[in-house]
Amino acid sequence: MGVTLRLDLDRWREHMRVVADATPGLVPVIKGNGYGYGHRRLARESALLGTDTIAVGIPSEVALVREEFDGLILVLQPWRPGDKLADELLDDDRVITVVSRAEDLQALIRMGKRPRVLVEILTAMRRHGIPANELARAVADLGELRFEGWTIHLPIGGDDRYAGAVRLARTALDARFGPLWLSHLPTEEAIGLSRQLGGTETPVPIRIRIGTRLWLGDEGSRTTVATVLDVHPVRRGERIGYRQRQSPLDGWIVVMAGGTSHGIGMEAPTPAASVRQRAVSMATGSLAAAGLALSPYTIGGKKRWFCEPPHMQASMIYLPRSQTPPQIGEEVPVELRLTTALVDTVDEV
């Protein structure tokens, strides 16, 4: 009894196979919460896809995938001097280390080790990377470091994304030739970039990192449900919950499996860009400020209101008196953002 992700395994794998077949040099990304499925499961699925390299987010995630996957493991978080675990991984021949500062390249060279390294280029993201005008000087002498290529992490939006990728890639290849590891560039554009820079006969080698589209691209392959843990009648004005708020109506309190430890009620800042999206965001924020928040649980065909903020592993939901309450043990749909969710069980169907 808890929060369950119900997975149509055959359909999910068919989707992943279609993406893999259309993506030369695919590098599956496995990071964070494992996109709701968990690191080990995604590492096994990557092995089944036949890819030779996967990417994790941070050094500690290497241990979560190495037993399930025999190939190379790219750590996306750039190396910094003094990171004990990252330093230990420099001796692991299966690990590729990202370096995003010229001074860090020099620090690695002085250590006298021979790690596999990717050099990150600063893009319009402005997150990590060496500026394009400093690349040639930064990689003029890499000592014993094993250069695996250039990594270019592009923003998701922007009208000049492809042009920017071409400009940065050309500068990088002029400094030192090597494979281009690309994120957030459509596959057809990545292939076009490879041919534009290297020619049809000798395209520049590319590796394309994909996470969300690979693992979560087919929404129809999965459903998420939560178990009803308890049901109580309540009258208007009765006090309920941790904070002993007064119930605003006659009805039912439905206690649902799932809380903050599952990612329920944990929201990221809104990416709202349009006027309508901003208006919806403002309205939702105003309701929250008034103590009202719509839950992700659907009962009787509608999402229902939280009684109060979710607890760690359970949530209390209002249901009006006119609605027949669900039975204890019944499962109801719950909408989860799988990049932040932690489910109790993954059921294959």
Image (cartoon, rainbow, N blue to C red):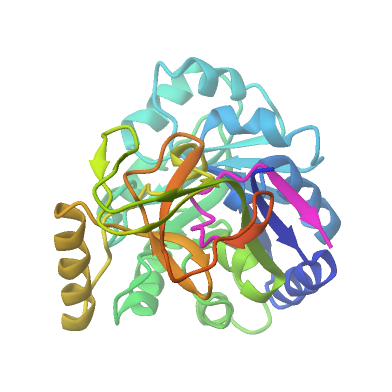
Measuring from the top left, give residue 77's x and y in whole percent. Answer: 45, 38
Foreground residue among 246 and 108: 246
Foreground residue among 315 and 47: 315
Res. 203 image quadrant: bottom right
Foreground residue among 176 and 51: 51
Number of marks in picture: 0
Res. 187 image quadrant: bottom right
Residue drawn at x 41%, y 42% is 140
Q: Is any part of residue 218 visible from this angle?
A: no
Residue drawn at x 44%, y 68% is 303
Measuring from the top left, give residue 323's x and y in whole percent. Answer: 48, 69
Is residue 347 highlighted in magenta?
Answer: yes
Residue 123 versus residue 137 in the image, above or below = below
Residue drawn at x 56%, y 75% is 194
- Main SS of the magenta part reads loop
In this picture, which residue range is highlighted in magenta? 334-349
Res. 175 image quadrant: bottom left
Measuring from the top left, give residue 274's x and y in whole percent. Answer: 21, 81
Foreground residue among 304 and 138: 304
Residue drawn at x 35%, y 65% is 155
